[in-house]
Image (spheres, rainbow, N blue to C red):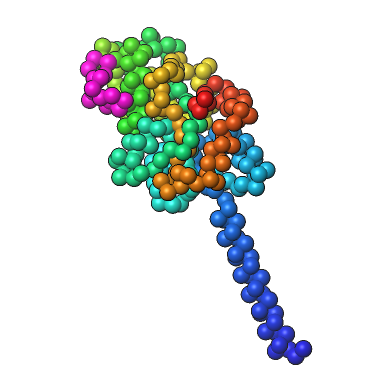
């Protein structure tokens, strides 16, 4: 073989290998399901992902820093699914952003809690005490309802599940409500008397909610709007691959992992 033919053959083989590698990479990317999450504590999902890998299903978690990002990424097609929010949050997001993301499976319910470096029970709160709550509509409303459950204030029942500070009808201690991004509520503990913190954020901050919260949200028939979900775009509601991920999550062995790793901070919600 002359030098020219050998050179052409080398180039041709190099291009072929490159194309095959490229196609392989694309195939792998297509076979990997990306799920948006918030928070560092993803032990349950790590377990589910390992289980799915044994069945040949590749799943990658995409971690976001706050609650404003994963739905936008899902709607824009940057991720395939997300699993960070409760039903009421998704409903509010869809309404505010004219999107139609849908839940395809329940995961857990994670009770909201009061945390404090200064007092040991809500009864110790004094007049003009400062209380930090999440500033998004659904979790802020949930926090105000929890303050009402604790007997610290009253809100207008007409506001339903999403009252705002403007719906407070009775505030005998004149509590000073500070609205913060949910990711900041744990960090604000030194600056307020009480902070109402989402369970995931509390766990990331090193708390064990059933032990460390000075008041924990009751789980009862009124808790349905706060059940966490796996969400997808509407066209994927019947996607068999995605539903197999839901099925892998909603299993008895996953319940054991939830109970062990969350130390009671999360309660399986699909049974």
Give the residue at the far right of this rendering: 1
Q: Please tell me how many numbered marks the rendered image carries.
A: 0
Which residue is at 50% across, 28% downward? Answer: 270
Image coords of residue 189 (percent x, y): 42, 24
The reply to whether the magenta stretch includes residue 153 is no
Answer yes or no: is residue 74 visible. no
Which residue is at 31% across, 25% downward? Answer: 161
**In this picture, residue 95 sits left or right of residue 22:** left
Image coords of residue 198 (percent x, y): 44, 27
Quadrant that contains the N terminus: bottom right
Residues 115 and 166: in front is 166
Q: Is residue 50 above or below residue 146?
A: below
Image coords of residue 101 (percent x, y): 39, 43
Answer yes or no: is residue 232 visible. yes
Q: Is residue 115 above or below residue 6?
A: above
Give the residue at the far top of this rendering: 123
**In this picture, residue 14 sits left or right of residue 137:** right
Residues 22 and 268: in front is 268
Residues 212 and 159: in front is 159
Q: Is residue 235 above or below residue 229?
A: below
Residues 213 and 242: in front is 242
Q: Quadrant of residue 172?
A: top left
Which residue is at 24% across, 20% downward? Answer: 156
Q: Which stretch is magenta?
A: 154-170
Which residue is at 34% across, 30% downward? Answer: 138
């Amino acid at each position: 073989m002359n030098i020219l033919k050998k050179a052409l053959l080398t180039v041709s083989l190099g291009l072929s290998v490159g194309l095959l590698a490229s196609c392989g990479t694309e195939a792998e990317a297509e076979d990997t399901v990306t799920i948006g999450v918030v928070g560092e504590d993803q032990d349950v999902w790590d377990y589910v992902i390992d289980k799915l890998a044994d069945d040949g299903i590749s799943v990658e978690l995409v971690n976001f820093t706050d609650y404003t990002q994963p739905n936008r990424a899902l709607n824009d097609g940057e991720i395939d699914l997300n699993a960070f929010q409760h039903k009421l949050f998704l409903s509010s997001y869809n309404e505010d952003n004219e999107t139609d993301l849908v839940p395809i499976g329940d995961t857990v319910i994670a009770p909201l809690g009061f945390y404090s470096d200064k007092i040991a029970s809500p009864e110790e709160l004094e007049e003009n005490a400062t209380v930090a709550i999440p500033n998004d509509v659904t979790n802020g409303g949930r926090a105000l309802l929890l303050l009402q459950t604790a007997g610290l204030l009253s809100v207008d029942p007409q506001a339903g599940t999403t009252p705002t500070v403007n719906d407070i009808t009775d505030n005998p201690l004149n509590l000073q409500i500070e609205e913060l991004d949910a990711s900041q509520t744990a960090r604000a503990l030194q600056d307020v008397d009480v902070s109402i913190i989402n369970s995931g954020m509390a766990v990331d901050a090193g708390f064990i909610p059933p032990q460390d919260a000075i008041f924990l949200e009751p789980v009862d028939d009124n808790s349905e709007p706060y059940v966490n979900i796996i969400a997808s775009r509407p066209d994927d509601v019947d996607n068999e691959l995605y539903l197999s991920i839901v099925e892998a999550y909603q299993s008895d062995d996953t319940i054991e992992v939830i109970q062990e790793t969350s130390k009671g901070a999360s309660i399986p919600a699909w049974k």
